[in-house]
Image (spheres, grey):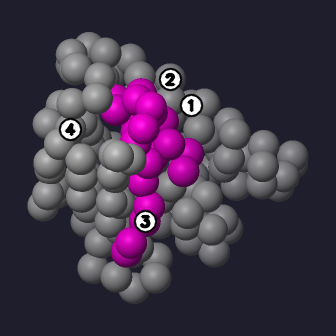
Amino acid sequence: MEYNAAFFGYVERMFKLVKEEFGEEKALELTATCLEQGLGSAYDSMGFEKGKPEDFARVTGERDKSVGLYVEFPEVTDTRIVYQFHDDPFPNLKGFVEAEKLDATYMKFKVSYLLGEGWSYRTTKHLWKGDECTEHVIEKMV
């Protein structure tokens, strides 16, 4: 993850500082806001059709790759997406915040912004727990 280590390092330092000064809830809120603003404009510039799983995989995959992350999508169907991170963008936050809380700072936005209402995600594997990847299973509620 050499390509954008400076950005991820900045987010880690910001999170730690805000948590120390204002608490974890504020740190999570500001991290989410920062990531949402950057991701939203990046996704908009790439063009996508909201609710289309193939577009979710395309734009998140391309964006993740552009910032040096290796991700895979072993399953993309009309109702299910398996999204795997093989790199940890925030390794220096392990032990400072629960993995699920940190992941929610970007996953809630990605799912809502790109897929819309009726989609949810759950984390089935995590690098911080010793798994080979962090895996988010995104499903459309039917």
Please state which of residues 121 and 61 is positioned toward the viewer in this rendering: 121
Nearer the viewer's eye, disc 3 or disc 1? 3
Q: Would you name the residue on which mark 3 appears? A: 123
First in sequence, mark 1 or 4: give its number.
1
First in sequence, mark 4 or 2: give its number.
2
119 is higher (above) or lower (below) than 98? above
Q: Would you name the residue on which mark 1 appears? A: 34
Q: Would you name the residue on which mark 4 appears? A: 53
Q: Tell me if residue 140 can be seen.
A: yes
Single out the residue that lies furthest toward the front: 142
Is residue 123 covered in magenta?
yes
Q: Are marks 3 and 1 in contact (CB under 8 Å)?
A: no
SS class of the residue under badge 2? helix
SS class of the residue under badge 1? helix
Q: Amino acid at mark 2?
A: Gln
Q: Would you name the residue on which mark 2 appears? A: 37
Q: Amino acid at mark 4?
A: Pro
Please name the residue shown 40% across and 29% down the image: 116
Q: Magenta span covers which residues?
A: 104-125
In screen coordinates, is 109 left or right of 141? right
Single out the residue that lies furthest toward the bottom: 130
Q: Tell me if residue 59 can be seen.
A: no
Nearer the viewer's eye, disc 1 or disc 4? 4
Q: How many C-alpha atoms fall within 10 Å of the one at disc 3: few (<14), some, or many (≥20)?
A: some
Nearer the viewer's eye, disc 4 or disc 2? 4
SS class of the residue under badge 4? helix
